[in-house]
Amino acid sequence: MKKLMITVALLGAMFQAGAQDAKTSAIPLKYGAQYTGKRTDDAMNKWRSNRFGQFIHWGLYAIPGGIWKGKTYNYAAEFLKSSAHIPDATWDSLMYQFNPVKFDAKEWAKMAKRMGVKYMTITTKHHEGFCLWPSRYTDFNVSNTPYKKDILKQLIEAYNAEGIDVNFYYSVLDWHHPDWRDDIKTPEDSVAFSRYLSFAYNQLKELATNYPTVKAFWFDGTWDSSVRFNGKWTYEVEKMLKEVRPGVIVNSRLRADDYGKRHKDSNGQLMGDYESGYERRLPNPVTDIAVTKWDWEACMTIPENQWGYHKDWTISHVKSPLELLEMLVHSTSMGGNFLLNFGPSGEGTFRKQELDIASYIGNWMGKYGNVIWDCDYAGMQKEDWGYYTRKKGASQLNMVVFNVPVSGLLKVNTPKGMVLDKAAFMDAAGKPLSVEEIAANQYLVHLPIKLYTSPQVIIVDYHEGSSKGSYQKAKT
Ligand code: JFZ
């Protein structure tokens, strides 16, 4: 019976998508979704218009960089403590080596600005439990390292000065705190874990209070049953953050409902303000088009699976700037944000490959950023040559072409009532490309045949109406 109710609720949710009415929910929930559809307030509109962000994973794991006692561990560098079975005390004493003498928040912010990101998400505390800010709730924080200074404060000041929003990643999972539990097996576990939840709640309140320009919280480490079956706590954290910092944005990864359902509640409604389950993968532009109905963000590593600094990047494929740029455009074309990860070294520097990627993407964004920022899903059928984006309210369509066919002919299938007028390369607006109407709602844009070595941006003007249909003359 319950299964049936869930199915009915899911179907209801599909048909209701976007409607501001949660009354159709079949299962009463205290800690489920707080609203349906997309948030449309200024803070959320800004988050959405940002589109491109820089993720930074930085913590004690940057010091060993994936290598322990001469042995290289291929698993994610930020998991080294676990993969190399390093005892707590040994790992925690890395804090006495944390002294990133080359760290320059202003340099980081300038690099991010040149890359074209509009926001940056920093790991305030990863699974290891080490805090990049002087938290009053634990000594395991930056003020007790040789470096001493508050990293978050410097980053916020520097990035905000460049006009870049700063968001906080926070791992609820904590390998350092004695009261953390994966699972609640005994009454003692339950007592300890409730102390842990108060600790995390206090830390989050501290972050929201002490860094007033924080725009969003990116929760992680919430998959264990201890958190999953504490929907009430996840609900209260979201509520508290929004009270302390009105407008603040919270990802879906924080939340669980009354029944331990995560991301989406038992009625199929997204919890939190955006979906954050796309990790090192992107939605399929043909089959996953439903993602355009809610806000979402994908996060991506440059190597296969390294978020924190790993000294050896030869152990997996390192994505090229063009692969990453294509992922950014792909995300925008499906109405999502793209968060590209960087893992600075223990000294506080970015490796050369990261700098090269940042400058390649930055050069492209410098010319074509307007087809990314403030752009969204264009409502067009996916074509093999690349991706469409559209700026809100504009009667122009952006085509970002990654695969030029040898024929030079780009097919455009338009929805009924959309008539293409003209097309031109964005950086040669005065030189129109020929647009040929070949059938009802089908056009070809003609490109000069040559070797293209970077993604081409074409701006198409259109109007709503019906075409005179010159192709019909050929009918017999
Ligand atoms: C988590 C962390 O464990 C990892 O170190 C990194 O911080 C990353 C951003 O987040 O890893 C995850 C979390 C969720 C999924 C996969 C890896 N997931 O939902 O598929």
Image (cartoon, rainbow, N blue to C red):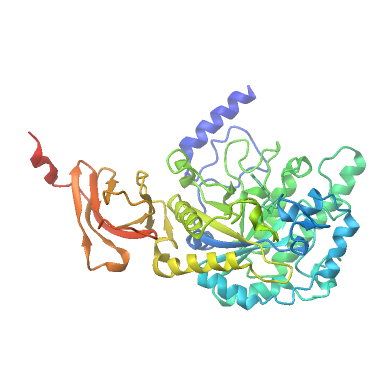
Q: Position of residue 232 (x, y in %)?
A: 73, 45
Vertical order, 451 against 364 (above or below): above
Vertical order, 469 against 249 (above or below): above
Q: Nearer the viewer, residue 389 or 37?
A: 389
Q: Is 207 on the left-hand or right-hand side of 2?
A: right
Q: Is residue 104 visible?
A: yes
Q: Position of residue 451 (x, y in %)?
A: 33, 58
Vertical order, 470 against 161 (above or below): above
Locate the N terminus by quadrant: top right
How many numbered circles does the render carry? Answer: 0
Q: Nearer the viewer, residue 379 or 385?
A: 385
Q: Nearer the viewer, residue 115 or 466?
A: 115
Q: Is residue 138 visible?
A: no
Q: Is 471 on the left-hand or right-hand side of 386?
A: left
Q: Is 199 on the left-hand or right-hand side of 409?
A: right
For residue 471, what is the image quadrant? top left
For residue 185, what is the image quadrant? top right
Residue farthest to the right, as pictured: 188
Q: Position of residue 325 (x, y in %)?
A: 48, 58
Locate the C terminus by quadrant: top left
Q: Residue at x 28, y 57 (%)?
A: 460
Q: Position of residue 118 (x, y in %)?
A: 53, 66
Vertical order, 367 against 297 (above or below): below
Q: Residue at x 79, y 48 (%)?
A: 83
